[in-house]
Structure formats: structure tokens, C-alpha cells
Image: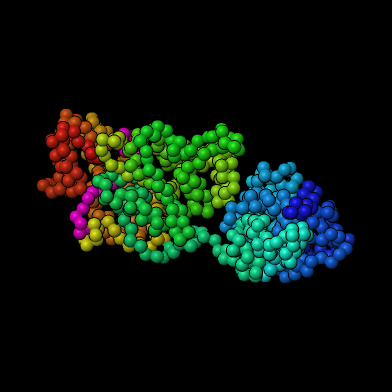
Amino acid sequence: MLSRLNASQTKYGIVNLIEILKGNHLEDYIQGVYTLPRAINEPQLKGALGVESLIEPLPTYWEEIQEYPSSIGYFCMIAVIFSHHNYINVFIQSSSSNMKGILHKADFGSVKPFTNIRGVLIESKATSAEYSRSDDVPYDLSPLYKNGEVGLLVKELLLDRLKAIGWAETPSSEFTRDFYEQIKKYEFHKVFSLSIEQLILWLEGEALDTAPSDVESINFDEVVTVDTHLLTSLKAKQFLILTGPSGTGKTYGIRQLASTLNPLATMDKNFNITFIPVEAGWKDGKHLIGYRNPFSLDGETYETTPLINLLLKANSSEYEGVPFFVIFDEMNLSHVEMYFSRFLSLIETAKHPNLGKEPMLNVEELKLLKKTFKYDYEYIPLINQAIDKGGLFVSDNVYFIGTVNIDETTYMFSPKVLDRAFVIEKNSVKPSISFGISNNAYFVKMTIGDIYSYLLDEEPADSHPELISLLDGLYEILEDSFPFGYRVVKECNDYIVVAEELKDKFDVNLEWLSEINSLYDEILMQKILPKIHGNRKQLTHVLNELIEFCNEDGNIRFPKSHSKLIAMQRILQITGYSGFVV
């Protein structure tokens, strides 16, 4: 029966109805007193106004809407949509719920109806003028629902449209449903991007809660407990590897940090984190970054992944100030160099602005991705932003963390990977420490705002000659078997800089941050020792020299590294092979 609503879709000019109403010129326009450079097609105008003839009295809601100037555009838009059954069906299909949707040119039978309704969306302020030439138009109806009085007027308009197709409040052989049963049957609530319950509340005069869930919802003054060991390594480098026995909290620590920094935690607990269980046999990056699909029903598209979805959010102007976390569980079940090589390259080039940033997905791939997200209001604007920026990039606010276990089913990391990461070993501890009876030397209380600032602000430039001297001594020991280059030296220096920033700028008073030898100990553990592995012939002399290096005048100056080297030496003597991660 909706097919009885069939006002002209193809004539231009209905968008001007909004301008006429906002100026309170509707009666004058109908009487010919107020004119436009190009008149509105009369059948189209009658369909939008809901009248058979322009000489008959207009419904009272056209006068009453003048009391709500900010809603006039939206009200006109609703009137236009409910002037033709095709518009109604397209908006049902375009709805993404949550008061939003995306209009697609491909869903219209011809171009003119699409350009007309696109113009109405822009003029009503339901979408931005930036989409004036776009084939995909995201729209937001939430401002309309802030006023319950406007809902009452829309109810009168809908009643009139139903009556125009033969519905009556008194049941008949053709229509047996009451008003709300009928609009549910026709799925009018989807036109409004609401649930049926929400639409009924609004049509009965109740304003709806339209408060956005954005970054400002986080309480930056809230004081939380944070692991400074983890925080410092992430600040120094976006790529972190966590190794250690199963059950030592490798994944938990990152999840806890991500949850603490999640601005939308009450709405989406995984908003700023994605968890990727690595599977055996990954040979390329398609599991992470997706692939072109030439066989979809919409022609060639780009198949997305949870990681690409996260990068779209992280790249957006709305969320560029939010830390995002990617956890690779059991990262070494496949060769990391095979499936993660693209990321390793992009993370490095991003640190050198003079080289120019290379995108993870280029503009052509993003346009194909839009077809995959055809009816998803959340992601289409994010993809459009990425297209405007020239591609989807690995942005500075994304942190990659891999958890590692070593057994007969896993692979060792190559020097190429270890060179580009910090490595934290999570060892098992006494039960009393696990249950918080003893104080952990790395934990401190900070405000969420300070954690945001520490992670995301640009790190200060500084250098430490004493560190260079230390690294020279290490290089003399390792140059024949395990040499390291400029990247490792720079990242060791970065670590000292960001650790001192945490201590001084944010007034974090922990012993490990205050003692320079403790920081040097961490550098050995996280950047130098992880690359060391081999048999007796390769390691016996190197381990002896490194153990001696950790001692000075009979004192152990780097206790964590010394302890680890002794353990590696013991395993070497027993098995004939040893390494940092075994």
C-alpha cells in the first residue's frame, strides 16, 4: 500500500522547501508573493506538504514547526522522505541504527532522486556539505530527537501519510492494525534509524538521549595504578614483545592498560584494542591487513580485518589522541618475518619524516573497502578521512604487542625482528607477590591524563654520552657474533630519555627509574641480550665476557642481566644450546 505515496522524485527544487520554511515564507510562496529563481515542481511540493491541492488548508504542523527553528530542516527532510515509497524503502535499507545511516547512490533507480535527497540531507544539516558530490552520504538524525515536541508533530505527519494510503484509525478489511502496529509493520522506525521502542517514545513527545559517546567521556583526572615498566617500553617503541612462561600475565597487563585508557569503556570494552590469535602456517599479511576480493556480489571489494578496523579509528581526527593496542597472542606460532614484515617496515619508515610515510592501504584499496562497509555509518566516515589523507597509515598512537612462548611448535625470532622491538621477560614469581602481598617495584599511581600525555606527546630530544660509552663496551664483546647497529643504539638512547621524562616530568619516584644502572640493566635485558642464542662454541666465551661486564669492582651493577646470563650459561652447560628466549 505504500506505493500510493508516489510524489515526483525526479524534478529539481524540493530542497528549496527548507529555505522557504526557515524564512517563514511558505504561505507567501504558495500564493505567489514570494518567488524563487527556480520554482519547486508543484506535484513534488504537494507530495512533501501532504495535500491534494495547494489551495486547500495546509496541515497545522507546517505552522507549528516554526516554533522550533533548529528542527525545521529535519522536519522537511522527513516530509520529503515520506512523500514517496522508494525514499522510504531506501532509508530503511540505509539505516545503521543508533540514529545514523548511510545513503548510497547505487540504491536508487536513477541519479536524479539520489541527488535530490542528497541535497535535502545537506540542506537539513543531517549531513555535511563535503558530501555534495559523494556517492555515499553518511547522515546523522540524532539532533532531531532532542525535542519531544517535534516528535508529536512528526506523529501527525505520519498519521496523515498513512491516511493518504487508505489506513484509518478504525480497523477495516484493508488495514486491521492500529497506528503503532502499522508503522512497525512498515518498519518506519528504521527510516528514523531508531528501535521501534525509541520511535514510539519520541512520537509520544519524549526527547531521546542523543549524547554522543566520545573521547571526552573519559575522566582524565582519575588516578589509576599503572605498570611503568610496560609504559616506558611502549613510549620508547611502538613494537613490544613479551616473553615468559604461560600464566605470568603477559596478555593481562596490556589488556588492563588498554581498558584503563579506553574512552568508550562503558559502550565498547574493546574499542581501543584488538586481540589477534596467531595461527600456525601464516605465510603472508592477508590475515592482518585483508585482501582484494574480485568475486563479491558488489564486484571487486576489499576484505577487511579487525586490525584494519582499528587502524581506521586510530587514523581518524576524532580518535587520533587515543592510544590503541594490538595484541598478537602466540606471535611466534608462525614466522613473524613472513606475516608481519609490512608492519616492521612501516613502523620504521614512520620514524623518518624525510622518507615520507607509506600507507598500509592506498586510496584505491580504501575505495574498495568502502564497498565492504556499504551500510556501516561508523566506518564510512573513517574511510573517507583516510582517503582524504592519501591512505591508511600505521599511526603513532597504535602499539603492537606480541606474546611469546617457546616450545616445539614455535619459531625463534630473527635478528631483523628483535632489532625492531623491545623485549620484556615476564618471569614467574612467588605466590605472595602474585597476590599483591609484596609491593611491585614497577607500579605507581598516575592520572589517566598523565598516562595519555606520556604515551602520546612527542618525546624530548636528548643524548647520553655515558650510555654510548656503555654500548661501546658491549659492542667490543659482541661485534664478532652478535653485532648491533645504529637503530639499537638510538632506541637504547630513546629508552633512557623517556624513562627520565617519566621520572622528572610526571614526578614518578621509583627506585628503578632513579638509578642509572637500573636503566642500563633494562636496556641490556630488552635490547641487547634477546638476540643472543647459539651452541657452546658460539656462546661460551660471549656469556663469560658479558657476565664479567655486569660486574664492576666485585659488585654486580646490572643484577637482572647478570641473573639472566647465569641462567643462560647453566642451560648451555646442560643442553649444549642456549638463548635469551628458550
| x 73%, y 66%: residue | 169
Lateral position of residue 529 relative to residue 272, left or right: left
| x 76%, y 54%: residue | 5
Residue toward you, 527 or 572: 572
Q: How many marks?
A: 0
Lateral position of residue 379 relative to residue 465, left or right: right
| x 30%, y 60%: residue | 444
Residue toward you, 21 or 237: 21
Magenta region: 414-433
Q: Is residue 46 magenta?
A: no
- Give residue 211's position: percent from left, percent from top: 55, 64
Q: Quadrant of residue 415?
A: top left
Q: Quadrant of residue 146?
A: bottom right
| x 56%, y 33%: residue | 295
User: From where the camera sits, is residue 100 visible?
Assistant: yes
Name the quadrant of the N terminus. Answer: bottom right
Lateral position of residue 290 relative to residue 282, left or right: right
Q: Is residue 473 above or below residue 209?
A: above
Residue toward you, 282 or 531: 282
User: From where the camera sits, is residue 419 visible?
Assistant: no
Please, which colouring scheme is shown? rainbow
In the picture as drawn, the residue positioned furthest to the left comes out as: 554
- Give residue 228's position: percent from left, percent from top: 31, 55
- Give residue 206's position: percent from left, percent from top: 62, 70
- Give residue 258's position: percent from left, percent from top: 39, 54
